[in-house]
Image (spheres, rainbow, N blue to C red):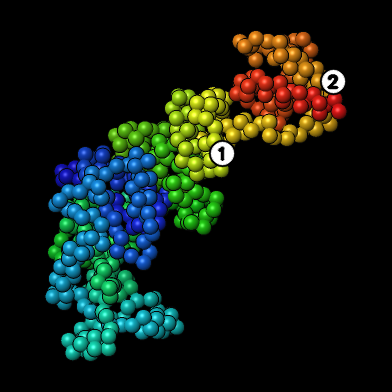
Amino acid sequence: MDQKVRVRYAPSPTGFLHIGNAQSALFNYLFARHFNGTMVLRIEDTDTKRNVEDGEASQKENLHWLGIDWDEGPNKPNPKYAPYRQSERNKEGIYHKYIQELLDKGIAYKDYSTEEELAEMRERQKANNEPPHYDGRWYGKSEEEQKAAEAKGLKPTIRFHFPKDHDYEWDDIARGHVSFNSDNLGGDFIIEKSDGMPTYNFAVVVDDHTMDITHVLRGADHISNTPKQIAIYEALGWDHPTFCHIPLIFNPKTRKKLSKRDKDTLQFISEYKKHGYLHEAIFNFIAFLGWSPVGEREIYSKDELIKVYDPKRMSKAPAYFDQKKLDWMNAQYIKSMSIDELTDRTMKLIKEGETEEAERLQTIPEDQLTTLLKKTIEVHQRDVNKLLEVVQYAWSYYTVLDQSFNYDLLKDNEDFANDDVLAVIKGLKDKLENGGDDLDYSQAIKEVGKDTGIKGRGLYFPLNLAFTGSTSAPQIYEIMDIYSRDTDIELLDRMIKAFEN
């Protein structure tokens, strides 16, 4: 690109970082890094009533966890553009300066309508089957009429006045040419609230212009805002940035935009972190929500995605959230990592203690827990989708003697003679009691099969049940190695007693 690229991710701290926020942040990040540009983080906190405590902190902490950093913004100021919170910029008078300019030009005006009057207007429009719109009742009012309203204690909002039958259009990177007519935009809209706070559609224009933003990448749900913003750009005599409206993320079951009511899908990035998804996998997965590179390949590192990123390959269609694909992708990353790396990450998950199993495992001495985790990962690295499953397996193995197994799975099964089951269990118990510290459990099991003449299901189902409570399990000799020798023997003893009684 000829111009120096400057993009921004501009969340509102009205909630925590969710999958839709992360998608916008990630595409801005890829765009900036691919074109050697600058990424700005700006906190749009003008909706003070809806701002939540730690909303900004959640955004920043979870962006860092995903591997998304920024060049300017809170904690990384550039004196030319700081501050980067709209509430602070408002105190500096940045927005009102341009509000006044529009008032002076007669493009903006004061509206003293009360909430009751506006509600009555909407009800009347509804009764007449009219689309909801502001009817312009305060446009062109005299200074005397304004003073009379103020004498009643009314505080005005400031509205932007649309010209009649004017087209606002732009060439969108993702969606091509887009056009809206001013007569279909809901009437003159508020640019400053009665408390003096600028509204989103006004503040974002001033911020993007004064911060030299060249490209705006945001969700497709903002398309209806864009013509209002272009109207402000035109009124102030500014060129607007290049827009790219990112596909929304849809629930494949409802075929509607992903919602907080969709209980079958995790919403917030902190939840993915808590469940043991790897940040590399989440980054990779989100990159494919509404965009794809050339070819069939699906596993990309962050650096590879930056290199191949092409904004022109953004989809126009909604992106469907595929939980099975995410689990598969996370599993691929788990399989590719070393035991030590996975142990460290699982240990960190446990120390953060955001699940019941994690809190319980915190009571185990760290050196003992590290050994338990390594052995658990050695067994399950090939079959888990997320690290929370490792935590759950580790807790299950640690508390195996506190669990009750249903031995009737084999005891009442006509396919397994009780004498054969006992022969296998007693045979292995004998090997454990008489074998040395270097006993090879895999070899011991093979010898039991040879000694008893019992093979296949007849050999392994009883052992699986003895050590896990289930007739299906990974390599049982690996699970035996997770337990102490005494625990292995006690588990075999329990099953012997169950079959002899």
Q: How far apart, in angstroms, are the residues tagged by discs 2 and 1? A: 39 Å
Please provide percent x and percent y for residue 380.
Answer: 56, 28
Q: Which dot marks residue 360?
A: 1
Please provide percent x and percent y for residue 389.
Answer: 55, 36
Q: Which residue does the image show at 32% across and 50% down from the upper left? A: 174
Q: Which residue does the image show at 29% across and 42% down from the upper left? A: 69
According to the picture, the residue beneath numbered tag 2 turns out to be 419
Reply above or below: 303 against 480. below
Q: Which residue does the image show at 42% across and 51% down from the upper left? A: 18
Please provide percent x and percent y for residue 260.
Answer: 48, 56
Please provide percent x and percent y for residue 138.
Answer: 25, 83
Dot 2 lies on which element? helix
In the drawing, does residue 72 fall left or right of residue 407?
Answer: left
Asked which quadrant contains residue 139, the reply is: bottom left
The kind of residue tagged 2 is: Asp
Q: Which dot marks residue 339?
A: none
Q: Which residue does the image show at 15% across and 51% down from the upper left? A: 79
Asked which quadrant contains residue 113, the reply is: bottom left
Crowd around label 2: few <14 · some 14–19 · many ≥20 (10 Å): few
Q: As rendered, which of 70 and 1 lies closer to the eye?
A: 70
The kind of residue tagged 1 is: Arg
Residue 459 appears anywhere in the view: yes
Pick whichever of labels 2 and 1 is earlier in the sequence: 1
